Amino acid sequence: MSSEKITRIAAGTIAGWSIVTGGQPLDYLKTQYQTRDHHLPAIKEIYRDIGLIGFYKGASSLYLFAGLVTALEFETF
């Protein structure tokens, strides 16, 4: 495998992980806002009850999927 190919795959993987890192907390907050009657306390409650990691609930499968798919996209396009 050429070094250019490895570079593109690595860049795609990092790009996919970056998408999840930035988007997952916002998506989780959106879901919490839609299921609660009050909006602002949701952020405080999540941080107080679970901590910073609480904003990334369910993100492990997204990291795998987004990293893989974006790496393939970078390599094939």
Image: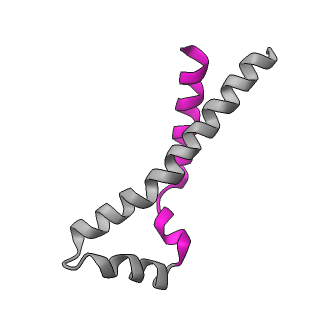
Q: Quadrant of the C terminus?
A: top right
Where is residue 15? Give x, y as percent: 58, 37
User: Would you say residue 53 sits in the magenta stretch?
Assistant: yes
Q: Quadrant of the N terminus?
A: top right
Taking the spot 55% from the left edge, 39% from the top edge, the residue there is 16
Where is residue 25? Give x, y as percent: 44, 61
Taking the spot 39% from the left edge, 76% from the top edge, the residue there is 43
Where is residue 73? Give x, y as percent: 53, 23
User: Would you say residue 56 sits in the magenta stretch?
Assistant: yes
Q: Is residue 56 above or below residue 39?
A: above
Q: Main secondary structure of the magenta part?
A: helix
Q: Is residue 60 above or below residue 54?
A: above
Determine the image quadrant of residue 31.
bottom left
Q: Residue furthest left?
A: 37
Residue situated in front as seen by the camera: 58 or 51? 51
Q: In the figure, is residue 67 to the left or right of 36?
A: right
Taking the spot 67% from the left edge, 26% from the top edge, the residue there is 9
Specify the segment rendered in magenta.
Answer: 51-77
Determine the image quadrant of residue 76.
top right
The type of colouring in the image is: one colour
Q: Residue furthest front?
A: 40
Where is residue 4? Give x, y as percent: 75, 17
Q: Is residue 23 above or below residue 75?
A: below
